[in-house]
Image: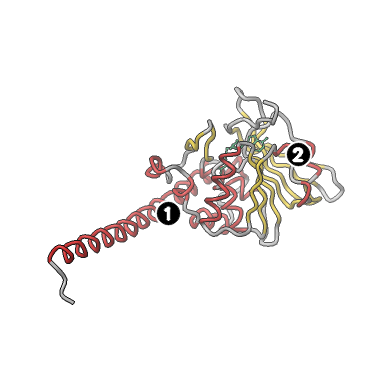
Amino acid sequence: MKQSFSARLIIYLFSACLLGSVSGLTFADDEYNKKRMELIRVIEDDVRETSLYLDKEELDARVMKAMADVPRHEFVRKSLRSHAYENRPLPIGYGQTISQPYIVAIMTDLIKVKPGSRVLEIGTGSGYQAAILAELVDQVFTIEIIEPLSEQARALLKRLGYTNIQVKYGDGYYGWLEHAPYDAIVVTAAASHIPPPLLDQLKPGGKMIIPVGGRFMTQELLLIDKKPDGKHQTRQILPVSFVPFTREQE
Ligand code: SAH
C-alpha cells in the first residue's frame, strides 16, 4: 500500500523521536557509569586519608564492587541527578537525606557481612543503603518512619529488581522481631542512645553500626560487637553528621 506524504512524514518523525530518546538514554547511562567510577576513586582516596580511624587502607573489594554497581542516580530526584556521583549527602524530601557515599561504603564494610547474612537497616530513606547491602547478602530488612519515603523506596527497589529486600513502615526503635536475630544491624539516623531492642535482636557474634549523639552535637559512629557470650564491645569509629533518629510520638 502506498503511503501518503503526511503518513510517511509522521512515521519518519516518530522514528526520529524514538531513536533520539533511545540514544539519549544510552548516552546518559554511559555518563553516569563514568561518574560512578570516578566516585569510586574519590572514596578510595578518602578511605586512605581516614585510615587511622578505620584501621585499614582499603575497604573490602566486594563492598567497592557494590558501590560501583548500584546506580545512585536512581535514588535521587531528577533535578539532582547531575550531583548523584558527588561524594556528599543529598536531600530526598521530608527533611531527610541520602547519605554520603563514603559513609555508606565504610558502614557497609565495618559490619563485615557475608553472602548468607541477614541484615536489618533502620532508616530506609531513599533505599540506597539497602540496595548496597542487598548486593552483598541474602536478605535485607529495612524500616522507615516516614510513610511516603517508605512507599517510594519500596516501589523503586522493586523496579530496580531487588527481590531480597523487605521494606516496612514504622518506628525502627523496636527493630523487626519477626525476622530476628540479625547478623548485622545498620542504623542510618543519629540516636541519643543505642536502642536496647536492637541489641537484643543482634545475633551473638553480630555487629551493629550506629551514629550516636545529640541533634545539634557532633555524633560518633559506633561499631558494636556482640560477643558469643552476649556481652558487647563498642568501638568509636569517627565523628559524623546524620539526620536525627525520630520516634513515633514526635
Ligand atoms: N539509609 C538512607 C539514609 C536516609 S536518612 C539512604 O540510603 O537513603 C535516615 C532515615 O532514617 C530518614 O529517612 C528518616 O526518616 C529515618 N528514620 C529516622 N528515625 C527513624 C526511626 N525511628 N525508625 C525508622 N526510620 C527512621
Choose top left, top right, bottom left or bottom right for residue 242. Answer: top right
Q: Position of residue 139 (x, y in %)?
A: 67, 57
- Considering every residue shown, the one lying at the far top of the view is 216
Q: Position of residue 244 (x, y in %)?
A: 62, 30
Q: Position of residue 105 (x, y in %)?
A: 56, 48
Which residue is label 2 attached to? Answer: 174
Specify which label sits upstream in the sequence, 2 or 1.
1
Which residue is label 1 attached to? Answer: 37
Mark 1, residues whose alpha carbon is within 10 Å: few (<14), some, or many (≥20)?
A: some
- Residue placed most toward the observer, 47 or 179: 179
Cβ of mark 1 under 8 Å from ligand 1: the answer is no
Q: State whether residue 56 is above or below residue 62.
A: above
Secondary structure category for the residue under label 1: helix
Report the number of discs. 2
Q: Position of residue 131 (x, y in %)?
A: 57, 52
Could you tell whether 179 is left or right of 98 in the image? Answer: right
Q: State whether residue 224 is above or below residue 136.
A: above
- Image region (quadrant) for ligand 1: top right
Q: How is the image coloured?
A: secondary structure
- Considering every residue shown, the one lying at the far left of the view is 5
